[in-house]
Amino acid sequence: VNTGSAGNVLNQLNNDTYFNFTASSVSLAQIDTLAELASYDVVMLGDSSTSHTQLQAMAAVLRQWVESGGGVVGTGWLIYSVGASTGTAIADMDAIFPVNTTPQYAYTNGVQLTITDNTHPITTGVSSFTVSDYVEYSSLGVDAGAIVLGTASGQAAVVAGNTGTGRSVYLGP
């Protein structure tokens, strides 16, 4: 979903020869029905510029899509955007992400992101690295059954989970 610095992420995803996919930038209005979401394999959300109101408006349909087999990736500032920091926490968003998204956001910065499981498909080939900018995390932790793949300052920062027949990832950096 294209808000804030989503264009930078889009460019990075499309500047890759290892995986065979094309990342597309869309507005929230372009993915707020199941028919529209059917055109995609994964939806990526995040960034503090994403409107809480817009996320609330499409949350129920996104939850239905993920629980029916879709994939969703939440990046840093997702908790800020869907949690208590910007309004009433969005329950449908909390249900599909592998971290508790309901609290006020929390973050650390200038820290080492430690990959704790480099055998998982998400982190295979990824080594620990320093994040000079912010790393958001949930002050209430991860969901039951979620897999922590990386931490920052001891907090879960890379987390994978399943929701229904769908899958989800939270990336705090």
Image (spheres, grey):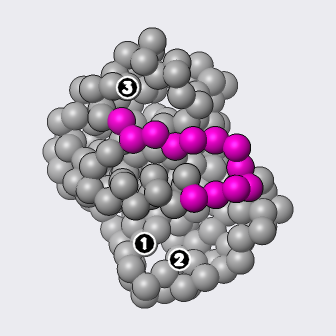
Which range is magenta?
15-26
Mark 3 and mark 1: Cα distance apart in space = 27 Å
- Quarter residue 120 falls in: bottom right
Is the residue under label 1 in contact with that under label 3 (CB below 8 Å)?
A: no
Is 116 placed left or right of 35 in the picture?
right
> Does the residue at mark 1 contact the one at mark 2 (Cβ under 8 Å)?
yes
> Disc 3 marks which residue?
31
Give whichever of 28, 114 is nearer the camera: 28
Give the mark, 3 or 2, whose residue is nearer the N terminus: 3
> Looking at the rendering, which quadrant does residue 9 occupy?
bottom left
Q: CA distance from mark 1 to mark 2?
A: 7 Å
Q: Position of residue 53 (x, y in %)?
A: 18, 36
Residue bearing mark 2: 152
Specify whether residue 144 is in view: no
SS state under label 1: strand
Q: Residue furthest top?
A: 35
Q: Is residue 149 visible?
A: yes
Sequence-wise, the earlier of marks 1 and 2 is 1
Amino acid type assigned to the residue bearing label 2 in the image: Ala
Q: Nearer the viewer, residue 11 or 65?
A: 11
Residue 42 vertical placement versus 113 (above, below): above
Local crowd at mark 1 within 10 Å, few (<14), some, or many (≥20)?
many
Q: Residue at x 62, y 24 (%)?
A: 69
Residue 8, image x and y in percent? 40, 61
In the picture, which quadrant includes the N terminus?
Answer: top left
Can you identify the residue that label 1 sits on? 135
- Residue under the point 47% across and 22% down: 37
Residue 22 colored in magenta in the image: yes
Asked if residue 101 is positioned above or below residue 24 in the image, the reply reads below
Element carrying mark 3: helix
